[in-house]
Amino acid sequence: MSEKFQAHFSEDQFDPEKWSARVFSGDVTLQSVTIHIRSPVLSSVGVYHLQLHMMTPSSRISYAVGSFVLLCNPWLRGDPVYMPLDAQIQEYITSDYGVLFMGSHSNVSMRPWSFGQYEPGVLEACLQLLQVSPQHLSDKNRDYFRRADPVYLSRVICAMVNCNDDLGILMGKWSGSYTDGVRPTDWSGSADILHRWVSSDCNPVRYGQCWVFASVLCTVMRVLGIPSRVVTVFNAAHDTDSNTTVEEYYSSTGEKLNISKDSIWNFHVWVECWMRRPDLGPEFDGWQVVDPTPQERSGGIFRCGPCPVVAVQQHCFSAPYDTPFIYASVDADVVRLILRNGQVVGRTVDTEGVGQLIYTKSIGSDKPQNLAQTYKSKKRPQPSDSPTVLLMMAPSQSLRMSGVLPEPEPCSWSCPVSGPAYLPAVSHEEASSDLEVSLNTDGEPTVGEDIAICVTVTNRSGSPRDLRVHLDAQLKDYNSGAQQSFWKEQKEVHIQPDDVLKLRHTIPSSEHESVLAGDDVVNVAVVVKDVRTKARVLDAQEFSMSSPQITVEIEGGDSIEMRKEYTAQVSFTNTFHKTLSGAVLTVEGFGLLQDKQEARLTLMQPGDKIEKNVSITATSPGTKVLIATFSHRNSPSVVSRCFHKVSITREWH
């Protein structure tokens, strides 16, 4: 920090609210002395310079002893980030390994992530992040003073992880070519990203998406001593107009339309940080949502939080920061509208789909812990005259009137859904209350295999029905709208009174093999029309495609010693029923391999294996991730990806 701390020798007791130093022992012959220094409990995070002054009645000699870094202290009871349980501190501070949950709620996938807080240069990068923040550059003294507050720190760092308003770490990109950077799916750890940011003189690293932004934020917070964990919300709502409702539009033949500014992300990843909230009161202490993915502005800057999780659960929408937006992300209603010639001809409301699962890594285990109940109250808000519920019905307006939130600003987020937003006219063709439809997939949809779908139609009326059934399948970006349909089907059916009809359909692999790859998301919808009454009912399901397995085996097991060479055998077997051309197996791993290594085959017959042996050496302890990918010429992207965890121990002498 700019001010130098001067050690004053005193036998007085340490004052927990002041800087103090005490001489404990000395040796005149060796000209040495032992001094214990104590910082106040509420000290600012940063680099401190220590000077020692030796005084005699006739002289004074000063020494620049050196520098030290002061961080938040979750072990200290009085610290705002104090965490009482050792197992929690081990998981949320000292562990450099995490698990990210991705995919869809019906097909959750997981991948390891190396937070890398012990990698050389990572601490320095995190401290530099504070030094180049707009808050520091505009008023250094005020910034230094406020760094004792983890609420302030989390808002500064959250904004600095994305580069939208500052010299931040990551640039986001959700579509198009990634040839001028790194695909977000190719990252496996934070250290590489932080090293690149520093070495480029604080130019943004290309590219990140939500899980990359969140993982880097988690690394920086843990480095600075703030307990943090990465959290995935499955079916997360992006509510742009703050009405806690998300609208989705479908054509009368089941095609999902991109005409809403709102969207449902199949998964969205943010961070929870542990801290006290003296600005709100002890009832809001604990886990706080901090989301660095640039979606909407908070206080004029692309950041989100810290928002108390308990405020979301209790619907306390006036609690800063960004509580209404977080609430909608985990508990919004989804209104699905069927359009025909610009008119609404069918409508369904889903009150359970958003935030079905909210996962984080369990303490001491890779298994998911579901946090949904910490966010979602069993009793949802209902319209009434109470001020709390009125605030819920129009949160953005109420908060701006109270001065908590600024006036809305145009969103320059780089991944909007396409198409204009409009309010369709309402038709008298309403959905029949006695006709129901549901859609489900049979088994786990896998790349290269047929996709089996079952549509269940229930007729609760006393009359027979003639029905027209439309099905539609589309590739969908996990965080925005659906693309052009790649499969459609239509059929006429007759259903008896009070009967249940099961209709089975198959999307052949030949219909999607040139469209879908591993981890891709598919939206399948069914619209059932009563031919006589024109009433329509809709159901839709989104799922992620599973991938064939890549096998990774490391000589001697998955725990290796530093600076020793080991062999990793990576292989992929063609489980498809066809020959693959131009097969490529790629292996890489930051901290294990210097460069990417590849194996290639011109043709892979069904049952053939492609294999690559690589030599790996770790130069630092902790957890590393070995990444293997498989692709072939006829696939639109990577067919399969594998993340293999490797534990590194120090070498023994």
Image (tube, rainbow, N blue to C red):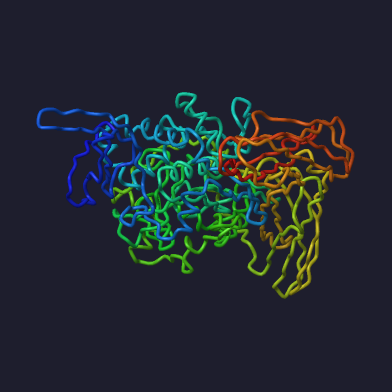
Q: Nearer the viewer, residue 456 or 318?
A: 318
For the question of whether residue 325 can be seen, the reply is no
The C terminus appears in which quarter of the rendering?
A: top right
How many labels were placed on the picture? 0
Residue 460: x and y in percent read: 69, 72
Q: Which residue lies furthest to the front in this view?
A: 29
Judged left or right of residue 444, residue 342 is left
Residue 144: x and y in percent read: 28, 37
Judged left or right of residue 207, residue 499 is right
Q: In this view, does 337 lie above or below 602?
A: below
Q: Which residue lies furthest to the left in this view?
A: 57
Residue 575: x and y in percent read: 84, 46
* Quarter of the view holding residue 483: top right
The N terminus appears in which quarter of the rendering?
A: top left
Residue at the image point whose x is 60% and y is 60% from the top: 348
Q: In this view, does 2 lie above or below 607?
A: above
For the question of whether residue 601 can be seen, the reply is yes
Residue 167: x and y in percent read: 42, 29
Residue at the image point whose x is 38% and y is 52% from the top: 74
Judged left or right of residue 175, residue 555 is right
Q: Which of 271 and 457 is in front in this view?
A: 271
Q: In this view, does 6 lie above or below 359?
A: above
Q: In this view, does 610 lie above or below 530?
A: above
Residue at the image point whose x is 44% and y is 62% from the top: 313
Judged left or right of residue 118, residue 156 is left
